[in-house]
Image (tube, grey):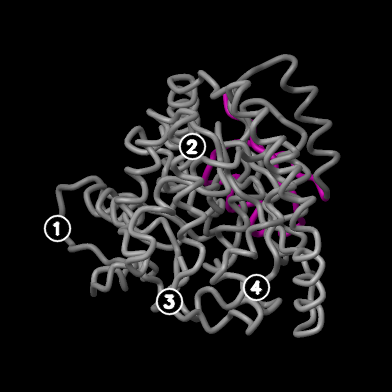
Amino acid sequence: MMYAYYIGDNSDWINRLSCCLNCQIMVFNNPLKTILCINEQSKKDTSPTYIFIESCNKIQDIQYLDSINKSNLQHTYLLLISEYIIKENIADNLHAGASEIVDINMPAEDLHTTLALLPKLKQYSTAKLQQHAHRFKLPLWKRIFDLAFSSAAILCLSPLLILTALAIRLESKGPIIYKSKRVGSNYDIFDFLKFRSMYSDADKRLKEFEALNQYREDTQENQTQTEILSLPQQSDETVLVADDFVTTEQQLLKNRRRQQKNAFVKFENDPRITKIGHFIRKYSIDELPQLINILKGDMSIVGNRPLPLYEAELLTTDEYIERFMAPAGLTGLWQVEKRGDQGALSAEERKQLDIKYARNFSFGTDLNIICRTFTAFVQKENV
């Protein structure tokens, strides 16, 4: 048995969903009442529950998704319903807890296919998580070394930290410390600290400078990633329908492989960086606030670089998941490889070096990387 709930007041959309699903839909005007009702229902039945959230605006959509997601409802899937899907908001909606973003005008059979697929995807993800369920545990020697090194470094570098903070504040408006969500060991998410080296609207301008990404494949095929793909009239392949594209399974897997190749983002001569930012990046001074992350236990002195969410979510396949079974580090193996040679490492080389470190790190390896890091501070290219 399937349970369907709707948050909103558009009667036309409610009637359309009711006809498509051929079932009665319980309608509410806010998430709280919906959560209370589902909690009662879940005590009696563990069948899949689908919550359709009528899209209003980005702020309210994310607020509703986040509040329901935090309630930890079991066997529940959140579907954001909209007539005009804004591609720029898709990632934020998914991160807030949406299982899927659905066009209200999609055919009934496609909606049924989507609803049937969601529990299977969740089951598959759970199986993969259990397969890698052994959590990485930081060795005691490494934690002791991290505490001693980071404490001494903060004490010795305190004058430099203060001067850097003053220079950042004098040059441009915005916070001195930049915080971003990063994924570390065991795929744990934490607040990653850096001295702000960019103008305050840098995140919003990321797409504007996408063509400068050194890890972006410069092919015509890449340009079709965000376009709507049209299929031939006659096709024997399985057709997959999503909120912003129609494609075959073969095409989808091909696009996925290309995304994995380009999971890292790096710009050469990034125009979003301030003058002070160029200086502190050149000498890696912008990384020093991560000594606080190390004291807190979020990171280690040496490890694999913690990744932004949008990069990490592309590396959760069996091929790359092992890189998260290691410490998240201030410096690491790929940072010192070819660092003096214009930082010329491909995205694939970086991933393989992360996996290599995860498999083979030791006290001797860490000391070697730290020594090589110190000699690589002064360089002509940002890495």
Mark 2–mark 4 CB contact (< 8 Å):
no
Mark 3–mark 2 CB contact (< 8 Å):
no
User: What residue does disc 2 label?
Assistant: 366
Quadrant for residue 223, please give it. bottom left
Residue 154 appears at what percent x and percent y?
76, 51
Q: How many discs appear?
A: 4
172 in magenta: no
User: What residue does disc 4 label?
Assistant: 197
22 in magenta: yes
Q: Which residues are magenta?
A: 1-29
Vertical position of residue 264 compared to residue 4: above or below: below
Q: Nearer the viewer, residue 197 or 348?
A: 197
Q: Of label 3 and label 1, which has the lower sequence position?
A: 1
C-alpha distance separating marks 4 and 1: 53 Å
C-alpha distance separating marks 3 and 4: 14 Å
Residue drawn where x is 46% and y is 28% of the image: 362
What's the residue type where badge 2 is placed? Asp
User: What residue does disc 1 label?
Assistant: 234
Vertical position of residue 209 compared to residue 359: above or below: below
Residue 145 appears at what percent x and percent y?
64, 32
Mark 1–mark 2 CB contact (< 8 Å):
no
Neighbourhood count class around disc 4 (C-alpha, 10 Å): few under 14, some 14–19, many 20 upward: many
Going by the image, does 22 lie left or right of 226?
right
Q: Of label 1 and label 2, which has the lower sequence position?
A: 1
Neighbourhood count class around disc 1 (C-alpha, 10 Å): few under 14, some 14–19, many 20 upward: few
